[in-house]
Image (cartoon, helix red, strand yellow):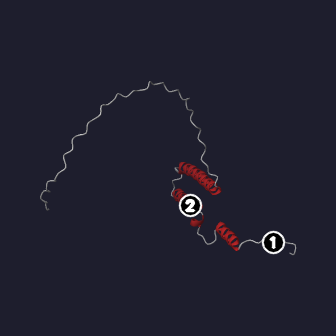
Amino acid sequence: MANDEYEIVPHKDILDLKKEIARLKGEGQTPDTRDSLFYAVTKLNDSINDLLKLFKAASESMAAEGEVADMSGVNEKLNTIIEQNKKIAEGIVALADLIKAGKAQAPAMPRPIMPEPRPLPSFKPFEMPEIPAIEEPPTPPPGPMPPPGPLKRR
């Protein structure tokens, strides 16, 4: 204890670090405010599980009613849907992880190959013809103005 080295740190820095730790732990926050994407994926996963339970219950009730002959095709389709849903859920979780890590970057698109620019053709300079000057129209001589007309009321 006597040989420990200490460094003086401002109280504000310590408080900032404590707040950051609490934020990272998610203390005092609901799941949707802490990580809305993770919460949405979890909610989606729960909904899919409920839907699968419903299909299984319907399958069992139909089998109990004696319609077993038709169930093999339905079971195969349900198994296909289950596998697709698992792949979709894994993809959503992978995207959420990439977004969390900040590594989601758009792939670089290759630039299209542009043809080499051709030289511009040479042009002869254009000479403007001379335009004759326009005379200004005559202005009326200064004098008294005529009185205004009667005002119209609505």
What kind of residue is marked 2? Ala
Depth check: 22 or 31 in front? 22
Q: Where residue 139 appears, x then y in whole percent?
A: 21, 44
- Give the SS element for disc 2: helix
As drawn, the residue found furthest toward the right would be: 3
- Whether 84 is drawn above or below 128: the answer is below
Q: Residue at point 12% right, 59% down?
A: 150
Q: Where residue 39 appears, x then y in whole percent?
A: 58, 63
> Residue 40, which numbered label?
2
Q: Residue at point 51% right, 53% down?
A: 67
Quadrant occupied by the C terminus: bottom left
**For discs 1 and 2, the disc positioned in front in the rendered view:** 1
**The image quarter in which residue 41 lies:** bottom right
What kind of residue is marked 1? Tyr
As drawn, the residue found furthest toward the front would be: 142
> Residue 6, which numbered label?
1
> Residue 150, which numbered label?
none
**The image quarter in which residue 31 lies:** bottom right
Q: Where residue 29 appears, x then y in whole percent?
A: 60, 70
- Whether 77 is drawn above or below 26: the answer is above
Q: Residue at point 30% right, 31% down?
A: 132
